[in-house]
Image: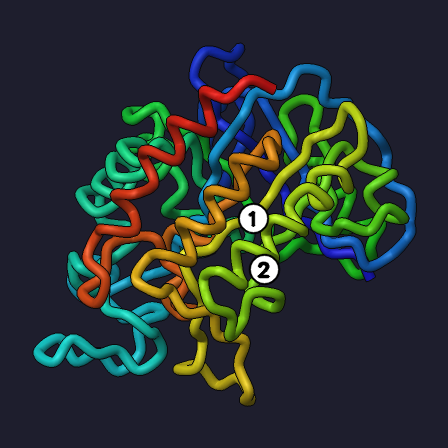
């Protein structure tokens, strides 16, 4: 089985095109990537090869949160206790309260904070036409454009009964060419695509101390870069931490402690040294899995605030 995640990137300064999204026309800048979860060796059509690769810092973004004040119901937040700042199905409590992803002020604040931290774009979780996440996409695009962020539509669900029909459905949404990036570091799959990536690394960093995490990244990140192959998009993934123990998932869980920000710092140092094309941050606001970079009651904004210096160093580095 082959599942697909489409990334359509909005980039200031590139030629503009138009395509229909949920029966409306939105002006998007063309730079598209298709992230594919490699679960089959089925060959995919190579549409566009990456020729000139600009460095990017992209954070996975989730626009699926809702509250009764804005959306008329709770979405994704479960059994909220605002007095004691607790939510049943998340690890930490958002510093700005239980927000709604369709709130203009919230999305604008998120885009502004990300840009101030040196993040160049969001990879936004997208669940199909007329989904809650889809209806919030114009708002995200508007705020991203205002703050000069790129935006990617990250396919979580694609219509189709088999791999071929899902690929056709995904590619059918692209206004022009695409860049195909495998969500895999396996050369068997990566050779078909224009780059390599992985969503999460907590399986390898779980229960490690900061020195152990840095040693792991020092050994592993160069291999991640090499996995892409010459002339392709190379990525490494960093996380502030990870803790999904408040979900329904069976124990033991692959918890990566934040260590007061030292986990993030150690991973950034090794990411910069490895010199990938893209640094992927998992995540901006996946509160359920405790991987959020966004400010929380528990950690404040200090981990987010550290991002700006790392971003400047990464983006300025010669390749």
Protein image colouring: rainbow
Q: Taking 128 as reference, is 118 above or below it?
A: above
Q: Position of residue 47 (x, y in %)?
A: 79, 26
Mark 2: secondary structure: loop
**Seen in the image, is 156 located left or right of residue 81?**
right
Q: CA distance from mark 2 to mark 1?
A: 7 Å
Q: Position of residue 165 (x, y in %)?
A: 80, 50
Q: Are marks 2 and 1 in contact (CB under 8 Å)?
A: yes
User: Quadrant of the image for the N terminus?
Assistant: bottom right
Residue 124 visible at all: no
Q: Position of residue 146 (x, y in %)?
A: 28, 25
Residue at far left of view: 83
Residue at far bottom of view: 251
State which quadrant residue 241 falls in. bottom left
Q: Position of residue 284 (x, y in %)?
A: 38, 51
- State the residue position of label 2: 201
């Amino acid at each position: 089985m082959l599942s697909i995640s489409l990334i359509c990137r909005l980039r200031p300064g590139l030629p503009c095109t138009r395509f229909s999204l949920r029966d409306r026309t939105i002006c998007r800048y063309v730079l598209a990537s298709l992230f594919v979860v490699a679960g089959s060796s089925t060959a995919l059509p190579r549409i566009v090869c990456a020729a000139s690769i600009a460095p990017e810092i992209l954070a996975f973004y989730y626009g699926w949160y809702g509250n009764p004040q804005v959306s008329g119901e709770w979405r994704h937040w479960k059994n909220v206790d605002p007095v004691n700042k607790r939510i049943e199905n998340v690890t930490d409590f958002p510093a700005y309260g239980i927000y709604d992803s369709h709130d203009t002020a919230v999305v604008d604040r998120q885009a502004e904070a990300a840009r101030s931290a040196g993040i160049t774009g969001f990879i936004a979780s997208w669940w199909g036409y007329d989904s809650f996440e889809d209806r919030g996409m114009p708002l995200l695009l508007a705020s991203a454009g205002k703050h000069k962020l790129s935006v990617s539509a990250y396919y979580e669900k694609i219509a189709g009964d088999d791999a071929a029909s899902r690929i056709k459905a995904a590619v059918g949404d692209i206004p022009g060419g695409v860049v195909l990036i495998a969500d895999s570091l396996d050369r068997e799959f990566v050779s078909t695509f224009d780059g390599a990536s992985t969503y999460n690394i907590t399986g390898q960093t779980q229960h490690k101390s900061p020195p152990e995490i840095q040693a792991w990244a020092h050994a592993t990140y160069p291999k991640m870069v090499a996995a892409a192959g010459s002339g392709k998009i190379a990525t490494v993934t960093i996380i502030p931490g990870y803790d999904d123990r408040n979900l329904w998932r069976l124990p033991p869980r692959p918890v990566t402690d934040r260590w007061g920000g030292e986990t993030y710092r150690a991973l950034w140092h090794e990411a910069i040294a490895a010199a990938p094309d893209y640094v992927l941050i998992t995540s901006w606001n996946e509160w359920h899995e405790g991987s959020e970079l966004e400010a929380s009651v528990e950690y404040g904004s200090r981990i987010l605030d550290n991002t700006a210096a790392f971003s400047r160093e990464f983006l300025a580095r010669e390749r």
